């Protein structure tokens, strides 16, 4: 291919030059021009909030700098909706004289349909298009049950994943070599939504920061991850989820680094490393669920019989949950962490999700949408999977009557109430062990609200709702 016929590389949630399947393959065929299409109206419809979009576009800017060092220009175009993407890419291909397009597959329904439309349109005009597997080890449909069905429970999926994984699927791909400069100028960085400066400081964008965070995690936290990850007042998690969700680091890079720290093993060894590897497989599992059960991408429950569950219409309770005013300190502290930082500790994501869906009996979709609005790591598959798991409408293999007691969770995982004191300063002066469920007389002077509902009453109400559902299904 001559210098006059560059290959288009379409970036989306794969904002890196290292170990990027589509970019690696595109660069083997001659000069590359990168493109990122901002679909702001579509992002709005998908519920992405300013925190996620800010991080995403900062990642695009960082990617542009990395590509510039390789003399690969990065073009940015705003197109509004996914429906406009095929013509936008065709137009760019014609403008540049490109004869081929490369991109990495995405598996949620809207993204899959967008990609199929692009493939079809390129074929119509006799331009080559190459869609690559990159975000997962196995293309959805490769791992199936003995009956030929998609897995609906994580543990057997994980066992199949470990049985069938092979070194070739874990191979890291080199970044492109520096190419001869093209007469194509990169576009200026896109307009980036404003967010609190603390969020940008906590989450610097780009693959260099992702790689540094991975190194620090493996050096300082990984060996204690299995137990430390459950304690929100401790720095026990990898904090890599935003980088993974937008592909500023690949799952292969993470697994290879974990294996190096685990004497080359992926299936046994250090308990902390094994627990973290398991979390990476969870991410892939939810991608398979999206593709194999597309109803979850349409706002429907994975467990179809739960669609008739009688959720409460309780706007005041919903507002109290969103604003951290439920009267359950661990729930309120977690929600304030979310709305102030754009992130929430994973243990607390389960606690607050189960509180909304079980204690308040409010539709899990309300919580799913609120998380997407605020999370910097808002990933549809993982967010939807987590919410449906907590609400017992999803892939959880445990019975529907599992209902976390938030006070017990607080006492167990924040024993001294340090996390509560950080986010609920009105309770910081209470004796540490009284912060979990402060007595009314101790709270009256602080303005902290009484619980919206007693745990025992809430639990029984949820049990009754699910029992009636089970009988009627």
Image (cartoon, rainbow, N blue to C red):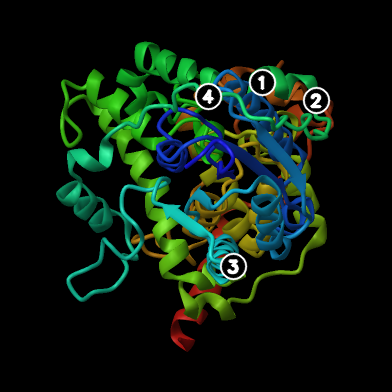
Position of residue 442 measured from the top left corner of the image (x, y, whole percent): 74, 27
Task: Give the mark nearer the N terminus: 1 vs 2.
Answer: 2
Task: Give the mark nearer the N terminus: 1 vs 3.
Answer: 3
Are discs 1 and 2 less than 8 Å apart at CB?
no
> In this view of the protein, which residue sits in the foreground, 472 or 137?
137
As drawn, the label of residue 91 is none
Which residue position is annotated with label 1?
421
As drawn, the label of residue 125 is 3
Task: Give the mark nearer the N terminus: 3 vs 2.
Answer: 3
**333 relative to 221, above or below:** below
Position of residue 125 measured from the top left corner of the image (x, y, whole percent): 59, 67
Query: Mark 3 falls on what kind of element?
Result: loop
Query: Mark 2 falls on what kind of element?
Result: loop
Task: Give the mark nearer the N terminus: 4 vs 1.
Answer: 4
Task: Give the mark nearer the N terminus: 2 vs 4.
Answer: 2
Characterize the local packing of mark 2: few (<14), some (14-19) or many (20 or more) Cα atoms within 10 angstroms: few
Q: Is residue 36 left or right of residue 106?
A: right
Which residue position is annotated with label 2?
196
What is the C-alpha distance between the residues marked 4 and 3?
35 Å
Which mark is nearer the camera, 4 or 3?
3
Question: Is residue 325 visible to the viewer in this orientation of the structure?
Answer: no
What is the C-alpha distance between the residues marked 3 and 2?
45 Å
Which mark is nearer the camera, 2 or 4?
4
Position of residue 212 measured from the top left corner of the image (x, y, whole percent): 48, 15
> In this view of the protein, which residue sits in the foreground, 131 or 197?
131
> In this view of the protein, which residue sits in the foreground, 120 or 43?
120
């Amino acid at each position: 291919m001559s210098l006059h016929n560059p290959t288009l590389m379409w970036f989306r949630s794969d904002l890196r030059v290292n170990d990027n399947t589509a970019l690696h393959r595109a660069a083997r065929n001659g000069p590359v021009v990168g493109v990122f299409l901002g679909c702001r109206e579509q992002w709005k419809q998908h519920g992405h909030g300013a925190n996620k979009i800010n991080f995403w576009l900062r990642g695009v800017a960082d990617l542009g700098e990395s590509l510039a060092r390789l003399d690969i220009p990065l073009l940015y175009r705003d197109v509004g909706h996914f429906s406009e993407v095929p013509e936008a890419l065709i137009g760019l291909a014609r403008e540049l004289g490109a004869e081929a397009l490369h991109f990495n597959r995405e598996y949620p329904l809207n993204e899959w349909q967008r990609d199929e439309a692009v493939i079809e349109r390129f074929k119509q005009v006799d331009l080559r298009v190459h869609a690559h597997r990159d975000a997962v080890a196995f293309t959805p449909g490769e791992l199936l049950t003995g009956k030929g069905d998609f897995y609906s429970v994580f543990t057997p999926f994980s066992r199949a994943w470990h049985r069938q994984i092979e070194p070739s699927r874990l191979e890291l791909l080199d970044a492109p070599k520096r190419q001869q400069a093209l007469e194509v100028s990169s576009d200026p960085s896109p307009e980036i939504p404003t967010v609190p400066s603390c969020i940008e400081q906590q989450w610097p964008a780009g693959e260099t920061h992702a790689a540094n965070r991975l190194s620090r995690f493996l050096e300082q936290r990984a060996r204690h991850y299995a137990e430390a990850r459950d304690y929100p007042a401790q720095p026990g998690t990898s904090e890599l989820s935003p980088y993974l969700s937008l592909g500023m680091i690949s799952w292969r890079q993470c697994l290879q680094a974990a294996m190096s720290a685990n004497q080359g093993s992926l299936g046994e060894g250090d308990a902390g490393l094994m627990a973290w590897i398991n979390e990476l497989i969870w991410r892939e599992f939810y991608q398979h669920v999206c593709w194999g059960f597309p109803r979850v991408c349409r706002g429907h429950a994975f467990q179809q019989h739960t669609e008739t569950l009688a959720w409460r219409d309780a706007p005041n309770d919903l507002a109290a949950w969103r604003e951290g005013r439920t009267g359950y300190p661990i729930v309120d502290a977690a929600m304030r962490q979310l709305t102030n930082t754009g992130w929430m500790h994973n243990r607390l994501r389960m606690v607050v999700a189960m509180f909304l869906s079980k204690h308040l009996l409010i539709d899990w979709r309300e919580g799913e949408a609120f998380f997407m609005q605020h999370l910097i790591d808002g990933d549809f598959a993982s967010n939807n999977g987590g919410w449906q798991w907590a609400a017992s409408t999803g892939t959880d293999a445990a019975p529907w009557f599992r209902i976390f007691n938030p006070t017990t969770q607080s006492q167990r995982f924040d024993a001294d109430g340090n996390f509560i004191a950080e986010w609920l300063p009105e309770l910081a002066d209470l004796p540490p062990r009284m912060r979990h469920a402060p007595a009314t007389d101790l709270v009256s002077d602080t303005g902290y609200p009484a619980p919206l509902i007693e745990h025992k009453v809430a639990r029984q109400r949820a049990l009754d709702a699910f029992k009636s559902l089970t009988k009627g299904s």
